[in-house]
Amino acid sequence: MTDTPDATTRTGDTSTVDLTTPTWEYAPAPEARSLAHIPTTRLFIGGEFVDPVDGGTLKTVDPSTEEVLAEVATAGPADVDAAVRAARSGAETWAAMPGRERAKYLFRIARLLQEHARALAVLESIDNGKPIRETRDVDLPLVAAHFFYHAGWADKLEHAGYGPDPRPLGVAAQVIPWNFPLLMLAWKVAPALACGNTVVLKPAETTPLTALAFAELCREADLPPGVVNILPGAGDTGAALVAHGGIDKVAFTGSTEVGKAIQRQLAGSRTKLTLELGGKAANVVFDDAPIDQAVEGIVDGIFFNQGHVCCAGSRLLVQESIHDEVVERLTRRMATLRVGDPLDKNTDVGAINSAEQLERITALVAAGGDEGAEAWQPACDLPDRGYWFRPTVFTDVQPAMRIAREEIFGPVLSVLTFRTPDEAVAKANATPYGLSAGVWTEKGSRILWMADRLEAGVVWANTFNRFDPTSPFGGFKESGFGREGGRHGLAAYLDLAF
C-alpha cells in the first residue's frame, strides 16, 4: 500500500484542489460472485412456482456492469387474480392457526435467512448495485431480525394494546421498492404473517431476484400454500394488485406520486392502506456538535446506499458560524470514499440502480448548477460500464432551489445555513415531506426541543440511519402515513373493529 494524496474537482471549474491528507490505497477484496444463486424466475402462487397465464417477462440487470442476470416472468391480471385467490384460501388455515404455531414458521424463516445470508447479500448487491458491506452487514442482519422480532409477537397479540382478541385483516397486497428489496419485504411480510394475514407481494421491476429467493426459502420452511405469494412485474402488475377486489389491506413503499394515486383509488373503499413515501430529510448540525462525529453521520446519512434512501439526510443545515469548517472536513472525508465494484468489500458507494434513476440524478444536479449552487465532487475514476455517479455536495444553496426541494434519491447533498434554533426548525420543516431528521448537538435539552418541533416521523440524535425492528418507522405529510416496525406496526395488519 502507498500514501497518495486525493484530488478533488469542482463541476464547471477546470482547477484541481489537492488535499494534503493521504488515503490508503486498498487492494481489491471482492466477494465471490459465484455465491449468488439465481432463484427460480417464475411466479410464486399457492406455494408453487408457476408460469404466467397472461403476463410476460422482464430482464433484470446488474447495475454495475449492465449484464443481464435473468429473465423473470411477470404477472398479468389473471395471475394477480390467481394469487389473491390462493392467498384467500391460505388465510383460512393461517388465521385459524394458534399464534405459537405461526411463530414457529417465522422463526424457521429467520433461521433460513441467516443460513443463506452470504449468498443473499451477494445476490442483492448484483441485482441492486449497493456495496456488499451494506447488504452483508446491514440489510441481511436486519431482515432476519424482523422475522425473529415478529415471531415473538405472534402469540402475544392480545398484549399489544389492541384489544383482548385482535383479528387479522385477511389478504394483504404489498408493493415494495428497489432500494432495499429484501429488507422492505421483511418489513412488510413479517408483521403481516405474525398477525395472521396472508400476502401477495410485488417486488420492484428492477430488483425481483431476492424476493424470488425468499419464495424458495418459504418452500424450504414448509410454509402452508398461499400464505406468501410473489408476483414480479412492472407498474401495471402493481396497479392490478392494488385494484383487485379481494384485497383487504394495501401496503405501499415508493414514490409520493404513486402513493397519492393509490390513495385516490382506494378512497371510500374498505381496504386498509399504509403508505411510506418520499423524503427530503434535514440533518441539523449546531455549533456545539462534535464535528468529526457529525461528518461521519452526514456521510452515512446521504451516501449510504448511493443516497437511494427515502429518509436520507439530503439537506444539511449547518449553523452559520461553523459552516466553513464543516464543509472543509466533509469534503476531505468525501475524498476518501471509494466508488466502484459493489462486490468489493472496500467499496463505499456502489452503482446507481438503473439508467432511468441515473438520468434523474444527472438532470437535478445540472439544475442545481443552473440555479447558482456550487457543486463539489471528489476526483475518482468511474468504471466504463454500468450506472455511476460521483458523491456530490452543493454549497450556496437557497431553499427555493430544486435541489433543496425535490427528492433526488441519489448521492447528492445540499448545504444550507441557519443562525438560531428557530430558524433551523423553520428551514427543516419547509418541505412537503416529513419522514426523518437528524440533530447534532451536545445539549440534550436542545435535542428534545428540536425533536418536539421537527415535522418528521423519525428524529435521530447524534446519529443517522439507525434502524431496529422494535422501533416504529413512518412519516407525516407527503411522506405517507402508518407505521412499520415495533408494536405500533402491528396495528396496520389487525382489524381493530373487533
Image (cartoon, rainbow, N blue to C red):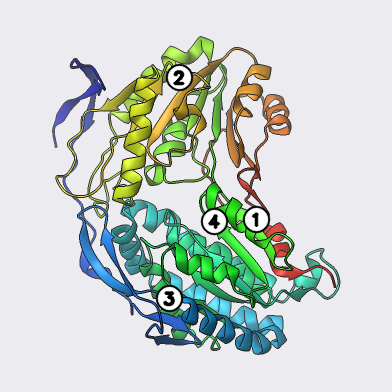
Of the numbered discs 1 and 4, the one sitting upstream in the chain is: 4
Query: First in sequence: mark 1 or mark 2?
Result: 1
Percent x, y of residue 85:
58, 85
162 vs 395: above or below: below
Q: Secondary structure at mark 2?
A: loop
Q: CA distance from mark 2 to mark 4?
A: 29 Å
Q: Which amino acid is tagged 4?
A: Thr
Closer to the N terminus: mark 2 or mark 3?
3
* Residue type, mark 2 in image: Val
- The tag earlier along the polypeptide, 2 or 4, is 4
Query: Could you tell me residue 169's position as x and y percent?
Result: 71, 74
Neighbour tally class for label 3: few under 14, some 14-19, many 20 plus, Cα within 10 Å: many
User: Could you give the CA–CA distance between mark 2 and mark 3, rounded to whole angstroms?
Assistant: 44 Å
Q: Residue at x 36, y 38 (%)?
A: 361
Q: Quadrant of the N terminus?
A: top left
Of discs 2 and 3, which sits in the foreground? Answer: 3
Viewer-nearest of discs 3 and 1: 1
Residue under numbered circle 2: 397
- Looking at the rendered structure, the secondary structure element under dot 1 is helix
Q: Which residue is mark 4?
A: 253
Residue 456's place in the image compared with 187, above or below, is above
